[in-house]
Image (cartoon, rainbow, N blue to C red):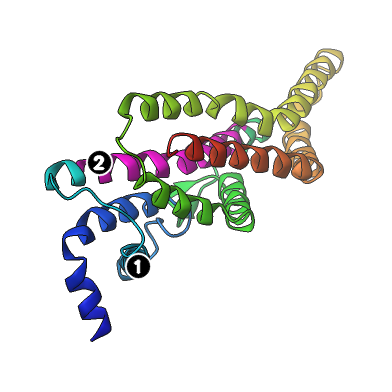
Amino acid sequence: MELYNLINTYAEKFIPVFIRIAVMLSFIPFIGARMTPMMVRVGIAVALTLLLLPVVNVNIENPVRSIFEAFFVGSAIGLTARIILGAVETAAQWMSIEMGIGVAAVFNPMFGEQIGPLSLFYTFVSMGLFFMLDMHHYFIEAIVRSFDMSSIQYKGIFDSIIKLNSILFPLALKIAAPIILVQVLINLAMGFLSRALPQANIFFISFPLLITSGIIFMALSLPFVLMVVSKAFVNVKDAIMVFTR
C-alpha cells in the first residue's frame, strides 16, 4: 500500500527519473550487460527511481523536454564509464595481436559477443575495479546532482564527453605499452637470428616465446595497469561531477 501511495504521489516525476536512471545503468559494467536478465536491470532501475523520487526536483512543465533531457543526461553519464572499458578492451586486443593469440575467441557476457581471452580478462579486471572504487555510487550521485541543474548545458556536456573520449587511445597505449615493447624487441631479435641462422625455423621458436613472454610481462605489469585504470576512473568521477554541477 505504501509503495502504491508513493508511485501515485510522484506519478508525474516517475517517467523522467526512471528513464534517466535506466539509460545510465545500461552503460554500467555488469548491470548493463546483455547477459544480465532484463528483470534484474529493470528492477534495479525501478528501485533506484523509487529511492530518488522524494529527493529530486523534476521540471514537469514540459514532459517532452523532461524525457529528452533524461535520455541525454543518462547517456552522457553512462558513456563516461563505457569509454574506459573501451580503452581497456582496445589495449587487450593490441596485446593479443602482438602475442599471436588474436585469432582465439571466447564469449564475452558483458557485450554478448566473441572477443579474445585477454580482452575478457582485462574487462573483468576493470569491472572489478569499477565496483571496488565505488564508482557506481558516484554515478548515482551524478544522477541526483543532474536534477539540481537549473538548465542542461548541452554544449558543455557534449564537449566534456568528446574531451574525455580523447583519452581512449592514449589510455589503451599506456595499458598495452609494456607488452607491445617486449613483443617488438623479441620480434627484432628473432629477425636478427633468422638472418644469422637461415636454416633454422624461427617461426616455431618465436611463437611459443612470444606467448610465454607476453603472459609473464602481463603478470608483471598488472599492478601498473591497475594504477592506470584506477586513475582513469578517478578522472571520470571528476568529469561527471563537473558537468553535473
Res. 189 image quadrant: top right
Compared with 85, 124 (above or below) is below
The reply to whether the C-beta atoms of the residues labelled 1 and 2 are less than 8 Å apart is no
Q: Which residue is mark 2?
A: 69
Magenta residue span:
68-94
Reading the chain from its start, which is encountered first: label 1 or label 2? 1
**What secondary structure characterizes most of the magenta part?**
helix
Magenta highlight on residue 112 = no
Magenta highlight on residue 75 = yes
Q: Which numbered tag is attached to residue 37?
A: 1
Q: Residues within 10 Å of mark 2 (few under 14, many from 20)?
A: some
Res. 172 image quadrant: top right
Q: Residues within 10 Å of mark 1 (few under 14, many from 20)?
A: few
Q: Kindly state the secondary structure of the residue where label 1 is placed.
A: loop
Query: Which residue type does callout 2 highlight?
Result: Glu
Q: Is residue 94 visible?
A: yes
Residue 77 at x, y percent in the picture: 41, 42
Closest to the observer, 129 or 18: 18
What is the number of callouts on the image?
A: 2
Q: Is residue 201 visible?
A: no
Compared with 196, 236 (above or below) is below
Quadrant of the snapshot with the N terminus: bottom left
Quadrant of the snapshot with the C terminus: top left
Tell me the residue at 46%/42% (across/down).
Answer: 82
Q: Kindly state the secondary structure of the residue where label 2 is placed.
A: helix
Residue 27 at x, y percent in the picture: 40, 48
Viewed as shown, does residue 113 lie left or right of 18? right
Viewed as shown, does residue 207 lie left or right of 245? right
